[in-house]
């Protein structure tokens, strides 16, 4: 069962869910392919240099495969949510990082995106809480939409009571 669902407070509802972007697989995949390429190229090398190409390729392939598996676990187990009361994030399964920030403690929400992030729709959310604490959500898909959902909830939180009852 989901970390977020297990840790909801009384009367708390999930309003928006985010997820990690698939871009996290690019680097492990590149190194995995590079290692496999070395192994295949060793088939055409002469007998003397074959081992000098094959074994580094094998090592790179094994390390990259392990990195890919760890990345897949992080990708599948990462959770991001905006509720009517908090922002909740959880990344990782063995080494787990969680962040739960009450909306009334949020001071600012920033998005950091490079060129590739803008092209492919991923970025880092920087959520500043009271006291200057900064919480980072790296490689999140559609960070602008996630920020918008946080801002919508912050707006609702700061509306006068009379307007909230009209909804």
Image (cartoon, rainbow, N blue to C red):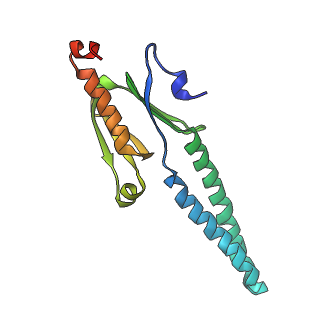
Residue at the outermost bottom position: 46
Query: Where, by quadrant of the figure, is residue 60 drawn?
Result: bottom right
Front residue of 9 and 51: 9
Front residue of 126 and 156: 156
Query: Who's the residue at 69% across and 79% down the image?
Result: 41
Query: Who's the residue at 39% across and 58% down the image?
Result: 119
In the displayed structure, would residue 49 be above or below residue 167? below
Residue at the outermost front position: 166
Number of residue marks: 0
Residue 55 image point, x, y percent? 71, 71
Q: Is residue 61 visible?
A: yes
Front residue of 99 and 117: 117
- Locate residue 13 relative to residue 34 in the image: left or right: left
Query: Who's the residue at 34% across and 53% down the image?
Result: 113
Query: Who's the residue at 61% across and 54% down the image?
Result: 68
Residue 45 image point, x, y percent? 73, 85
Q: Is residue 129 visible?
A: no
> Which quarter of the rendered picture does the C terminus lie within?
top left
> Which quarter of the rendered picture does the N terminus lie within?
top right
Query: Where, by quadrant of the figure, is residue 33 drawn?
Result: bottom right
- Locate residue 61 relative to residue 122 in the image: left or right: right
Residue 146 image point, x, y percent? 38, 38
In the displayed structure, would residue 65 be above or below residue 100? below
Residue 121 image point, x, y percent? 41, 52
Front residue of 14 and 92: 14
């Amino acid at each position: 069962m989901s970390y977020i669902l297990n840790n909801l407070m009384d009367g708390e509802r999930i309003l928006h869910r985010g997820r990690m972007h698939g871009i996290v697989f690019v680097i492990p995949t590149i190194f995995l392919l590079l290692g496999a390429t070395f192994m295949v190229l060793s088939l055409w090398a002469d007998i003397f240099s074959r081992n000098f190409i094959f074994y580094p390729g094998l090592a790179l392939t094994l390390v990259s495969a392990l990195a890919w598996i760890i990345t897949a676990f992080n990708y599948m187990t990462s959770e991001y949510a905006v509720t009517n009361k908090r922002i909740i994030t959880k990344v990782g399964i063995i080494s787990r990082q969680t962040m739960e920030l009450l909306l009334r403690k949020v001071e600012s929400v920033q998005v950091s995106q490079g060129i590739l992030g803008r092209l492919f729709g991923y970025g880092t959310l920087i959520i500043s809480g009271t006291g200057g604490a900064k919480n980072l959500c790296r490689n999140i898909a559609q960070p602008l939409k996630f920020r918008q959902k946080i801002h919508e909830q912050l707006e609702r939180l700061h509306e006068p009571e009379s307007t909230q009852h009209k909804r």
